[in-house]
Image (spheres, helix red, strand yellow):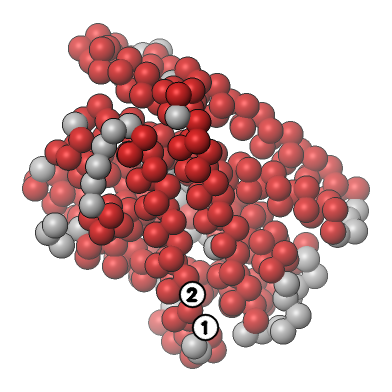
Amino acid sequence: MKKLDNIFFFIGIVAFAIMAMQLDLNEVVEGVKRAGYWFPFVILLWALLYIINMMSWNVIIKAQGGKVGLLWLYKVTIAGFALNYATPGGLMGGEAYRISQLTPKVGVEKASSSVILYVMTHIFSHFWFWLVSAILFIIFYSLNTMIYTLLGVIIVFCLAAIMLFLKGYRNGIVNSLANICAHIPLVKNSASRFIEKHREKLLNIDMQISNLHEKNHKAFCLAVFLEFLCRVLSSFEIMFILLIITPDISFLASMLILAFTSLFANMLFFLPLQLGGREGGFMLSVSGLSISASAGVFVALIVRLRELFWTGFGLLLMRVKS
């Protein structure tokens, strides 16, 4: 376990150093000065949001009969997101780390299923957030034909994804993913051997995934609600930053900027910390709401600094014994 933790920590530190070097020090200093007291507010906001993330994961763990300390779970939650920010592919590093940390407490099957369920719930809430935001955009803003068409495509895409996730919740998803890997040319032989060796464990993990949706529906709905709430509340970050530039920004506009920025950034999930994708998303979303491009650049910079702060803090938490 210690060796695995050291590997995760080393990968995270290297990625963090690379990301930090992409920033212009003068821009960082000027950005923090301009943000003033709003920057600590943004940092503290995410301390709250990570608590909500932790509560959602804890709901899933408890529904599966597990029990862990909340302070320990909060630490692992922050460290897991730090690795997700730092590693290409986003959901690879952090989720493997969470499973490795949770396994000694609840066993490998429950650890795997709870982490997979949490990841599914986290992503599932994003599709709901994008769907609701697209509908609100149509209701409250006058748009041209091209934007209406784009929002229509987003709505259809989100609805299709929600249906796909519900099917995964009902039937489990691990065996389906494993079977897909068994048909990929470069990995099919090793994947087939892995499936044969661990077939019973994979079936048990899928059973635990489907049980949460079918037999503990209240816990499932609560976990989804908490993650959706986290998406909505994170819009305050955008609002806090834009209030530095303009007093006329509304929470709804901040929510829409976040929704379409995150949608754009997640389309480029393979980049560490979505380098470039997030900035491009901010530029597109603020221009669509008649906010200056310079405001989009400033928002992107402050959000990038917040992510670096929590990435660095999360990596340090990996070295804290508990």
Q: Residue at x 62, y 27 (%)?
A: 163
Residue 239, image x, y percentages: 63, 73
Q: Which residue is mark 2?
A: 42
The amino acid sitting under disc 1 is Trp
Where residue 73 is drawn, which disc sits there? none
At label 2, which amino acid type do we have? Val
Q: Can you say which quadrant of the picture contains the C terminus?
A: bottom left
Pointer 1 local density, CA inside 10 Å: few below 14, some 14–19, many at least 20: some
Circles 2 and 1: CB distance less than 8 Å?
Answer: yes
Q: CA distance from mark 2 to mark 1?
A: 6 Å
From the viewer's side, name the closer residue of 4 and 47.
Answer: 47
Q: Secondary structure at mark 1?
A: helix
Furthest-top residue in this view: 196
Q: How busy is the neighbourhood of tag 2: few (under 14 within 10 Å), some, or many (20 plus)?
A: many
Which of 236 and 146 lies nearest the eye of the viewer? 236
User: In the image, which disc is placed on residue 38?
Assistant: 1
Asked if residue 184 shows in the view, the reply is no
Q: Secondary structure at mark 2?
A: helix
Q: Left of 103 or right of it: where is 297?
A: right
Q: Position of residue 194 (x, y in %)?
A: 24, 16
Residue 238 pos. (x, y %): 60, 70
Q: Quadrant of the N terminus?
A: top left
Name the residue located 56 percent from the left edge and 26 percent from the top edge. 166
Q: Quadrant of residue 158?
A: top right
Where is residue 15? Give x, y as percent.
31, 58
Residue at the image position 71 percent from the left and 83 percent from the top: 246
Question: Which quadrant of the structure image shows residue 207?
Answer: top left
Res. 231 in view: yes
Answer left or right for 263 relative to 269: right
